[in-house]
Image (cartoon, helix red, strand yellow):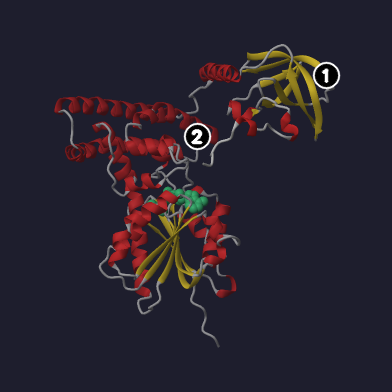
Amino acid sequence: MARDYKHYEELGGAEGRDLFFRPARHSGAQLFGGIQPTVRFGEEPCALADLSMAGIGFFSKQTLLAEERAPVSISVGGRLIFQADAEVRWCEQKGSRARVGARFVNRQLDLDAVVGQARLASTLEAIAGSRRRKIDPVPERYRALSMELLCLLRRTRERLDELELQVGPLTEARRDELVAEIEPPFFEALNPIWLEMNEIAVSQELRSSDRKAVKEFTALTLRPEFMDGPVWRRSTEKPFGYPGDYKVMLAAYGDPAGPCSLYGAVLHKVMAWRVGACIRGRKELMRAALERELGRGESSAAPMRVTNLGAGPAREIRDLLSADLLRRPINVNLVDQDAQALQCAMDQSADQRQKHSGRATMTGLCASYLDILKKGRLYDQIQDQDVIYSLGLIDYFKDASVRSLVRGMYEKLRPGGLLALCNMKAGPRSLYLPLDLICDWELIYRDEAQMRAFAKGLGGDAGAPEVDVVAEPSDRVLMLFVRKPHAAPEQ
Ligand SMILES: C[S@@+](CC[C@H](N)C(=O)[O-])C[C@H]1O[C@@H](n2cnc3c(N)ncnc32)[C@H](O)[C@@H]1O
């Protein structure tokens, strides 16, 4: 019978340079993360490159000679975390610096212990430093309002915890009933406070260093109070490694809070329902626009081709397909860098697509929008589209990136086709406080003029497009519509 393991006589060792075993080396950045240790060889300060139990690699301003010996030390925040005598093994010039490899001669380095020491030293440094960090740049009125909000949140938590104890374990249905009664007066109390705070935080009078202080202050004082609300926590922790994943979006579309306290469920409702109103608003705006586009091309038997960039759960498509009758067949191409988001969008609209027996088809591309719009890998696979849109993507991009996105989208449109892009609206009523300050969910907020500017210069000789900017009902998101002109009739 064939063996699926080796006998001892068949086991070999390494070959070539690997014959000479060297303990594993770990890069300084990997070992210490954000901590910057100070390294000295003798008196000379050096930059750490890597470490092993037997030696150290560093960059030195001076060229060192092989076999040169000196004490080497590593410290963090002024605290010595390792010291040994070291001998230079090799030294190579790299640009203006020398890259040096040295071995420890009188002791070995315990990596775990050194990393542990570094973390402790860095923590102690941070605690000492936080005494020096003043909250002076945070406007006084903002501080007072924060305390008012903190008291409201803590009082509410206390009362709701008591209520939960008194009524005993809650079924989900009963908890929903209670939330429906408790959330409106709670939001009524909270809303004026955080609107005023938001107005202060987005004010042009704040310098950017003050804005940083406001953010740190809010994170330290208010953020913990919101973390009982599942969608607040998810938005802050970003478990998929990016903000606004499809599960956060689903909360805004009405997904339940899941297991949490009554207080957590009330907070969840505030984020999902009140903050999320603009998510539902832009979704509805897009659904209506798609429906109009189906009507415009009603006489065509060919499917209307739609591409959705940063599709997430693509709820507007599911809602569009919920209609009993589609005025024209439709093919939707979803693009998202997250395969789970695409799976969710496909699953959630499966029944609706089936209902239209072949008149509604959907494909998905797990790719970056860049691959679709920049000449290269996927560019040629996307045929000209009747509609290209994106909800909740350009808010993350600087102006130059949005301009090139818009140009790329416009190029891929058929004559007469529609491009739609939305962005969070700037201003005193923006969602900067709950998203950026509390959840560290950074977005770029824009006004109507900035949105219109993205369509400037499109069309060239073929004629300028029709441009419109519309706000969704809560007035917190703006949608830019750009219609490509029909080709001019041939002379
Ligand atoms: C805020 S969500 C919006 C989702 C959906 N459009 C909605 O409104 O419900 C943004 C989506 O963009 C996707 N995304 C982020 N960066 C992307 C990129 N570079 N290329 C493609 N998709 C991206 C994310 O995975 C996420 O699903």
Identity of the residue drawn at 35% across and 26% down: 147
**Residue 40 x, y percent position in the rendering:** 72, 18
How many numbered dots are placed on residues in this image? Answer: 2
Q: Nearer the viewer, residue 386 or 1?
A: 1
Q: Residue at x 34, y 71 (%)?
A: 359
Q: Tell me the quarter of the picture where residue 285 sits.
A: bottom left
| Mark 2 crowd level (few <14, some 14–19, many ≥20, 10 Å Cα) | many
| Dot 1 beta carbon under 8 Å from ligand 1 | no
Q: Residue at x 60, y 62 (%)?
A: 375
Q: Indicate the quadrant containing the C terminus: top left, top right, bottom left or bottom right.
A: bottom right
Amino acid, disc 2: Arg
State the image coordinates of residue 323 (x, y, percent, origin top left).
27, 65
Q: Amino acid at mark 1?
A: Glu
Residue 149 at least partly seen: yes
**Cβ of mark 2 under 8 A from ligand 1:** no
**Toward which corner of the image does residue 22 lie, by quadrant?**
top right
Residue extending furthest toward the left? 167
Residue at the spot of label 2: 211
Q: Which residue is mark 1?
A: 67
